[in-house]
Amino acid sequence: MRHLKASLPTKQFEYDYDYVPPLAMIKTVPGLGFTLGWALSVLLVALRLLINLIAVEINKDLKTLDNQLSQIVQAI
């Protein structure tokens, strides 16, 4: 277990001891690592699901809108 802990990458954080004096608060929050392309792909898939749920509720075929969103996803 010790060798596993030693092999993990360590990040150097900067702490602010003046914000709340007895606590060490981190100065910057690290990013999540998501790319814009990935976030757009997730958003478009969620939009397609929403369109399908709306189509089921109103009992209409919204295939053309779904096809347009599919083409956008493939373009990304």
Image: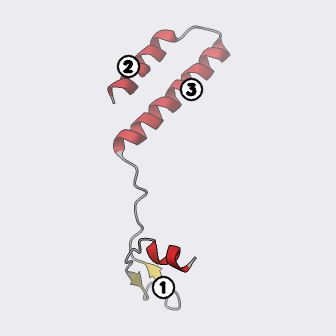
Disc 3 secondary structure class: helix
Task: Measure the C-alpha gap from mark 2 to mark 1.
Answer: 49 Å
Judge from the rendering whether residue 13 lies leftward or rightward of residue 52; answer left or right: left
x and y percentages locating residue 75 in the rendered image: 32, 25
x and y percentages locating residue 69 in the rendered image: 43, 21
Disc 2 secondary structure class: helix
Sooner in the amino-acid sequence: mark 2 or mark 1: 1
The mark lying in front, picked from 3 and 2, is 2
Q: Bin the neighbour count of mark 3 within 10 Å (Cα to Cα): few under 14, some 14-19, many 20 and up.
A: few
Return the residue at label 3.
Answer: 49
Please name the amino acid that badge 1 sits on.
Ala
Return the residue at label 2.
Answer: 71
x and y percentages locating residue 67 in the rendered image: 44, 14
Task: Measure the C-alpha gap from mark 1 to mark 3.
Answer: 43 Å
Please name the amino acid that badge 3 sits on.
Leu
Return the residue at label 1.
Answer: 24
Judge from the rendering whether residue 1 lies leftward or rightward of residue 42; answer left or right: right
